[in-house]
Amino acid sequence: MRRLISAVLMGLVGLAPVQAAIKGEEVEYKAGDTALRGYLVYDDAVKARRPGVLVVHEWWGHNEHARNSARKLAEAGYVALALDMYGDGKQANHPDQAGKFSGEVGKNLPLMKSRFEAGMKLLRKQAQVDDKRMAAIGYCFGGSVVLQMAREGENLRGVASFHGGLATEHPAKPGKVKAKVLVMNGAEDPFVPAEQIAGFKKEMESAKVDYKFVNYPGARHSFTNPDADTNGAKFNLPLAYNAKVDQESWAELQSFLKLVFK
């Protein structure tokens, strides 16, 4: 009877039945002597172990955009960790600073690997995670990072890049890449010219990587970030949010994750 009354009252006031919420936790971990501050998210109603997905932030740093993606992944049934690749959770407030932060990591492969692997180690040891089923996604700078980690042979089922750079000084070698690769690119992104795309495809094919490249017509750089228009106008950068492509690329990611984790 109490349940019936509760259900009726919820219906009267437009409330949904109480369910376990998506749980987000601030986590601190280290790579060498550097303190890193991440964000771990999962559905605490699910008792079974499930795949883990690492989320690597844009060049702005570990911000709400990366955290929101981690939450969406948790809602989709995964355990997600938004990484901190810069240390101490720091964020850039100007493109010059963002370029400096991302360059320090992007041009130092051992540093990039150590910080990525520190996050991967943390996610693998979570009680909710099936550590044999791991993937990574990244945005902008983060997209470049996850592609490079695939090139380096990290033990991941798949990596997905949203509007990330494709060039590298350390190309993939045949037999080394374990992950399936998904690249989602804005066709109007001036940071990823046609010759870079052609070079990337040639690299993947030469290394016999299982990859998919999706080019979204009309999409510019940072098409998944709702703050892109504001940042583009503020700093005179070719950034633009595209709600349609954001939705389409997220659906593409969901299909990809189901494929790699089956």
Image (spheres, rainbow, N blue to C red):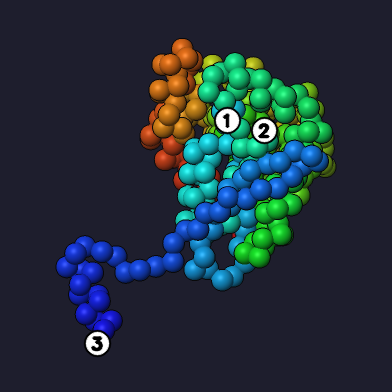
Query: Looking at the rendering, in which quadrant would you find the C terminus?
Result: bottom right
| Circle 1 residue | 91
Whole-angstrom CA distance, mark 2 to mark 3, is 55 Å
Viewer-closest of 116 and 156? 116
Q: Which residue is mark 2?
A: 86
Question: Is the C-beta separation of discs 1 and 2 under 8 Å?
Answer: yes
Amino acid of disc 1: Gln
Give residue 1's mark: 3
Q: Secondary structure at mark 1?
A: loop
Residue 212 in view here: no
Residue 176: x, y in percent? 82, 41
Q: Secondary structure at mark 3?
A: loop
Q: Kindly indicate the quadrant of the structure image that contains residue 171.
A: top right
- Residue at left offset 38%, top offset 35%: 244
Q: Earlier in the sequence, mark 2 or mark 3?
A: 3
Q: Earlier in the sequence, mark 3 or mark 1?
A: 3
Location of residue 249 in the rendering, given as x and y in whole percent from the top left corner: 48, 39
| Residue drawn at 41 percent across, 32 percent down | 226
